[in-house]
Amino acid sequence: MKAFIISGGEGTRLRPYTYYVPKPMLPLGGKPIMQYVIDNLKRSGIKDLIVTTGFLHEKISSYFGDGSKFGVRMEYAVEKEKLNTAGSIYAYRGKVKETFAVVMGDHLTNINLADMISHHRKKGAIATVALYKSTMPLEYGVAKVETGKIVGFAEKPLLEHLYNTAIYVFEPEIFEYIHEKDDFAKDVIPRLLKGGKKVESYIFEDVWFDIGRVSDYERLDELFKVVKLFRDLEIGQKL
């Protein structure tokens, strides 16, 4: 089974770190973010990978090569101009003949893709979108009012949100709904819904991080360093 790893963005919100290093190659715990993405794909048995790249693409291809050192097969689709998430796979229309996945090269997650794919096939959808379930407490109490009368009151209730993680499973038919330079969330999914196509959700609550800001990256980098330190100490004690 194939998976596309979308990695063509410039990571402008993470500058100055991304002036000379593409976002997927920023290090966390001694290895680039994309390596964690690849590790999670492997855990689900997905080893045939297509990396869509653009900005500083040679940094990615020179590190991963053909993927053999990492237990996968990798090829690269280099963008000569900005194509957006869906547009970056547009050139593969007619070349992909089976169910495939799309993930971001700069997100951290432990989502069980094998289970998501099984769910997708069971539901018979053209597309399945992974949604991350999270709750956020309000700072104030909330009243329920009917005809001017308070009929209920909740003190600092939890609001549930389902975030689009930009992790997708598609059938090959999806290429009929992709135009050049399209974005999956802004263009393709709404086009599917408008056309009455079945779009399924896969809701999970484990781990998902979109490292979108400098503060996010620096916080996670420190956390990974601490985890690595404790692992090294544990290994040293066993020796």
Image (cartoon, grey):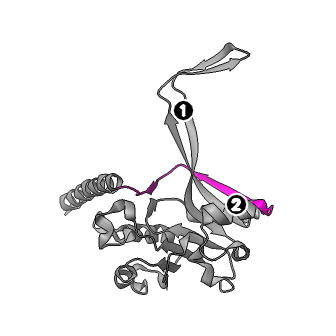
Front disc: 2 or 1? 2
Q: Amino acid at mark 2?
A: Pro
Q: For the residue carrying disc 2, how many other residues have a C-alpha within 10 Å: few (<14), some (14-19), or many (20+)?
A: some
Magenta extent: 194-213
In front of the other: 46 or 3 = 3
Q: Is 193 one of the magenta-colored residues? A: no
| Tag count | 2
Q: For the residue carrying disc 1, how many other residues have a C-alpha within 10 Å: few (<14), some (14-19), or many (20+)?
A: few
Q: Residue at x 62, y 79 (%)?
A: 90
The spot of residue 12 in percent (x, y) is: 38, 64
The spot of residue 23 in percent (x, y) is: 38, 68
Q: Is 212 one of the magenta-colored residues? A: yes
In front of the other: 22 or 126 = 22
CB under 8 Å between callouts 2 and 1?
no
The spot of residue 41 in percent (x, y) is: 50, 70
Q: Which residue is mark 2?
A: 190
Q: Secondary structure at mark 1?
A: strand
Q: Residue at x 50, y 73 (%)?
A: 5
Q: Which residue is mark 1?
A: 158
Q: Quadrant of residue 210?
A: bottom left
